Amino acid sequence: MRGALELLFWVSAGLILYTQLGYFLLLAAIAALARAPEPGGALAAPEGADRQLPLVSLIVAAHNEQAVIEQRVANLRALRWPRERLELIVACDGCEDQTAARARAAGADLVLELERCGKVRAQDQAVARARGEILAFSDANSRWEPDALALLVGALAQERTGYVCGQVRYSTGEPDATSQEGVYWRYELALRALESRLGSITAGNGAIYALPRSAYIVVDPIMGHDLALPYRMVKRGLRARYLPAAVAVEKMVPTIEGELARKRRMMAHTWPIVVRGGLLSPRGYPLGYYLMIISHRLLRYATPFLHLIALGANIAAVALGSGAPLIATLCLQGAILLGAALGGRLGWRPLRLARHYVLSTAAIALGLYDWLAHGTAPGWTPAEGTR
């Protein structure tokens, strides 16, 4: 019995360590051996006269964003892309404030005033009205660097590229979750860059991405584009790429607890994709990409349950007389949980990192609970403090 518990612990702990660190090291080693090219800023818009450039429809879905929509439209109008080749569309998803009026006043080319239907359906309706050969998407609270659109379009010009997302940088105006989430996000982006070098990314982001109109897919309204589009592109024989040179800036959630609530909401939209959206079906995947899906998606989302298994097996094995190694691992798990508890009151960075890790991991399981217990609504509410 004790031997079985010890094996269960080591397998669970090994899977956690692999998905959190080993997967990154494996991709880095493969990329170095294969001399895979770095995704960088060498990509640019097609050269030639402005009339040769594709018409781009840049879509912003917004729900009650009167506080930021004027700045958002102004920022997009200032992009280094010919104005006559850029169509700015704001899709107002059941807005009850002045979002639509302010978007028009700021110079949006098309403002749709829609019944509340959720972000994805608002995007679908904007696409139906768009004239562009290229579709680009952004959030209302993002700010794009001037050359971001040109870089995205240049990336899409590469062979078999069906989706490209840029880099999101978070502004850190508040000294709480910002620094901890920043550490996690930089690591996630480094991992995303490795995936892109070796084939395709397993997830994108909603702040800055683009795809050819011919590649656009209508998905379930509770399944956001961030996760649903990249793997579906791969199943269609296309690449989903990450381009760090194309930069968007967003304000970060100012507290760890606020970040937990945001991740919990995101995971309530993620679990339907995992369970019934075809993400885990190997059909259409190259073998290497399927291993990425298992490593970066399935095992990452299984992490809270692996932690519970590891903790329970560790406690039971020590109770049955396991020796020093299992006692040490139990003390380590206890220290992480204690650090997470103290991280809400003390400012020591390791404690805050422990708190961020524990709460972020818990958010994965809480998102699953929310979806199973209450379902997931297609609408969304902006995270507090990000506007």
Image: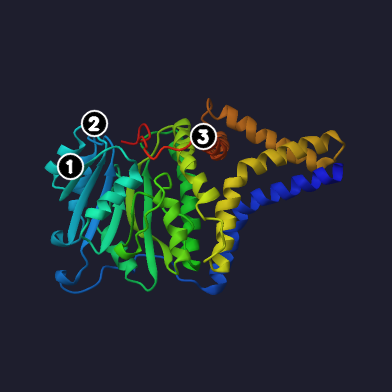
The crowding category of the residue bearing disc 3, from other C-alpha atoms within 10 Å (few below 14, some 14 to 19, many at least 20), is some
Between marks 3 and 1 in the image, the one whose residue lies nearer the viewer: 3
Residue 348 in sight from this viewpoint? yes
Residue farthest to the top? 345
Q: Residue at x 73, y 35 (%)?
A: 331
Residue at which label 2 appears: 96
Residue type at mark 1 is Ala
Residue 206 x, y percent position in the rendering = 37, 49
Question: Judging from the image, what secondary structure is the residue with disc 2 in?
Answer: loop
Q: How is the image coloured?
A: rainbow
Q: Earlier in the sequence, mark 3 or mark 1?
A: 1
Front residue of 74 and 309 = 309
Q: Residue at x 57, y 72 (%)?
A: 33
Q: Quadrant of the N terminus?
A: top right
Vertical relation: 142 (above or below) 370 = below
CB contact under 8 Å: marks 3 and 1: no
Front residue of 55 and 316 = 55
Question: Judging from the image, what secondary structure is the residue with disc 1 in?
Answer: helix
Residue at which label 3 appears: 370
Q: Is residue 36 left or right of residue 117?
A: right
Residue at which label 1 appears: 103
Residue 88 x, y percent position in the rendering = 20, 52
The span from disc 2 to disc 1 (Cα, nearest Å) is 14 Å
Q: Is residue 263 left or right of residue 319?
A: left
Question: Judging from the image, what secondary structure is the residue with disc 3 in?
Answer: helix
